[in-house]
Amino acid sequence: MNGVDRRGQLNRNKMRGRIAEEIAIEDYRECGFTVRRTGIGSDFLAEKCKMSEHVEVKLGGGRLSKRQKKAMSRAKKDGCNYTVYRLSGDFLDYYISKNSESLNEK
């Protein structure tokens, strides 16, 4: 794979990751959580009543980075929840196919 192909694949992966994050955020909001993006060690913090949860969104078999593993360990030591929200590639493909018009507007 040459540099142009790699760059294109990286851009596609980033786009798919952003869509996966939006799906997760939408899911949490529908369950009554308020969501605040963090971007450091987790994608967002979901809060409801007195409960808070750091959430990292992963697509398919994506693995946690060292920074994310440290954030998970720190959160657990502090008594906070840290959730890895996983989406399958098949689900994401289906979601994109059914919502392509609204995704193009963003």
Image: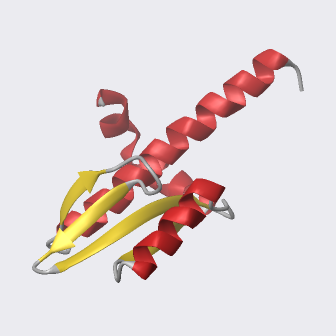
**Is residue 86 rendered to the left or right of residue 4?**
left
Observer-nearest of 92 and 14: 14
The extreme right residue here reads 1
- The quadrant of the picture occupied by the C terminus is top left
Task: Name which residue lies at 46% across and 71% down.
Answer: 74
Observer-nearest of 9 and 82: 82
Q: Is residue 90 above or below residue 17?
A: below
> Residue 15, percent across and down?
51, 37
Quadrant of the image occupied by residue 95: bottom left
> Residue 105, percent across and down?
29, 29
**Is residue 86 rendered to the left or right of residue 103?**
right
Q: Is residue 89 above or below residue 102?
A: below
Q: Is residue 14 visible?
A: yes
- The quadrant of the picture occupied by the N terminus is top right
**Is residue 54 rendered to the left or right of residue 84?**
left
Observer-nearest of 30 and 65: 65
Observer-nearest of 46 and 96: 46
> Residue 40, percent across and down?
43, 49
Task: Name which residue lies at 10% across and 79% down.
Answer: 49
Task: Name which residue lies at 55% across and 59% down.
Answer: 68
